[in-house]
Amino acid sequence: MQSVIKFSLSLFLAISLSMHAFAEEAPAELVLQGVDGKTYRLSDYRGKWVVVNYWASWCPPCLEEIPDLVDFHDAHQDKDAVVWGINTETLPVEKLQAFADSYLVSYPVLRGSSDSRDAIGPIPALPTTFMISPKGEVVARNVGPLTRKQLEDFINSQ
């Protein structure tokens, strides 16, 4: 029974990602500070997919998907895609970095702001993930946790 529920949830999430597909008229731009002190701009990643994941440390589904996001980022960062993790809390940088280190997060962890919260689309719940195409267009949004396979399946279907 549990495997049926897990399969149904997986199927629902895959359909959810594709059902919320949309295209922006102009390339999206978002500029945020990373906990590493660097400035990150979406426009610097043209030519690659950017998985923009809004999350919080208190959110169980957010924590559940971190290992898959790390695996996806590590497998794709030198080829065709990267992950950005945008934290929606107002945590001190040191605390946020320690949290990311404890989860072995290899992708950029960025500090969200009130300006960035809905900059590329609405965030009805956490986690919310946006897919930014290599052209810089927001092409999909998923509310809820994602897996590496779902991300790869989505990219391969485009």
Image (cartoon, grey):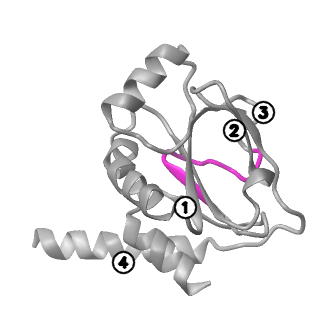
**106 shown above or below 33:** below
Q: Distance between the residues labelled 3 and 1?
A: 30 Å
Precedes in sequence: disc 2 or disc 4: 4
Q: Is mark 1 on a helix, strand or loop?
A: loop
Q: What stretch is highlighted in magenta?
A: 119-130
Instruction: Return the x and y of residue 71 as percentages of the image width and height.
Output: 37, 57
Q: In which quarter of the image is residue 149?
A: bottom left
Horizontally, residue 101 falls left or right of residue 157, namely: left
Label at residue 121: none
The amino acid pointed to by label 3 is Asp
Residue topped by disc 3: 115
Q: Could you tell me if the residues under marks 3 and 1 are in contact, i.e. CB atoms within 8 Å? A: no
Mark 2 to mark 3 CA distance (whole Å) = 6 Å
Residue visible at 62% across and 84% down in the picture: 158
Q: At x 33% / y 72%, what residue is drawn?
A: 10
Residue bearing the label numbered 2: 117
Closer to viewer: mark 1 or mark 2: 1
Which residue is the site of mark 1?
Answer: 78
